[in-house]
Image: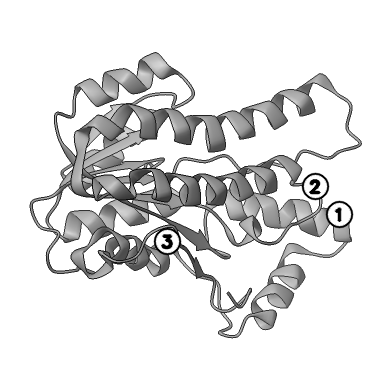
Amino acid sequence: MTLDGLSGRTVLVTGSSRGIGFGIARAFAAAGVELHMLADDDAIFEAAERLGARAHRADITSADAVAAVADALPHLDVLVNNAGLELVTPLDDASADNEATFRRVIEINVVGTFLVTRALLPRLGHGGRIVNTASVWSRGAEALFGAYVASKHAVIGLTKSWAKELGPRGITVNAVCPGWVRTEASLRSLHAMADRMKVTPDALLDEIVAAQILPGFMDPDDVAGTYLFLASDLAANITGQSLGVDRGEFPW
């Protein structure tokens, strides 16, 4: 999957050691960009080697760690804020662990997105692109996932606000809202939802995909093209938007 006009541009994809992030990075690599990949695990080094990219390991909730990544990038054309954490945070769970999980989800998905964007903004010039990963749950919701749902609603808010803030600089800001994609995180969430509903994960998945306009369980490569489009000159007049890639699960 490629898109003309991206060759030679410098792109950073966060949360790209696996899942949707790796699929996005692979699509950009095929388009001939100078690719940088960031994640907070050692798997990022093997993932980057596979794609001929430069790896950066950092906790995006640390301003100092993010600043070090920015120092290694004198110029940037496209920033993809994909790093995120999706875990259950039941409201009636008063444990310290659940509270810590709630805070961590918000810190990574919201604060981390802010810190990365703030640090890399000086590297983005006129024509720069910022693409944030939100979720279909950024306009909907699911029981037990309060922190994740709130964080993805926040990503849409950041996208709209930053689009207005950065428009005068010629920088566009948009969000992609993936639906059900076959990743480690989505399968973990599927099992949690199935447990709550007292059904099997397979039965629940069948129900979910049957309710989509286009039935089927997507893979990361199925959503990557939207990121390439928003990063390209074809999307020069699109900003402040959230594009659903969900096979019609939520008509947008």
> Which residue is identified by label 3?
220
Q: Is residue 39 among the parts visible in the rendering?
A: no
How far apart are labels 1 and 3 at the CA level? 26 Å
Q: Which mark is residue 196?
A: 1
* Residue depicted at x 70% and y 61%: 140
Q: Where does the image place residue 226, in percent across and percent down from the top left?
A: 36, 66
Question: Element under label 3?
Answer: helix
Quarter of the rendering containing residue 2: bottom left
Up-down relation of residue 72 to residue 200 (above or below): above
Q: Where does the image place residue 160, in percent across and percent down from the top left?
A: 49, 52
How far apart are labels 3 and 2 at the CA level? 24 Å
* Residue depicted at x 43% and y 44%: 162
Asked whether the residues under the numbered discs 1 and 2 touch, taking CB atoms below 8 Å apart as contact, a structural biologist would say yes
How far apart are labels 1 and 2 at the CA level? 9 Å
Q: Where does the image place residue 164, in percent across and percent down from the top left?
A: 41, 49
Which kind of residue does numbered mark 3 sit on? Pro
Q: Which numbered mark, 1 or 2, is in the foreground of this view?
A: 2
Upstream in sequence: badge 1 or badge 3: 1
Judged left or right of residue 125, residue 245 is right
* Closer-to-camera residue (191/104): 104
Quadrant occupied by the N terminus: bottom left
Which kind of residue does numbered mark 2 sit on? Leu
Q: Where does the image place residue 122, in percent across and percent down from the top left?
A: 24, 30
> Which residue is identified by label 2?
144
Q: Around disc 2, counting alpha carbons within 10 Å, would you say few (fewer than 14), some (14 to 19), or many (20 or more)?
A: some
Q: Around disc 1, counting alpha carbons within 10 Å, would you say few (fewer than 14), some (14 to 19), or many (20 or more)?
A: few
Upstream in sequence: badge 3 or badge 2: 2
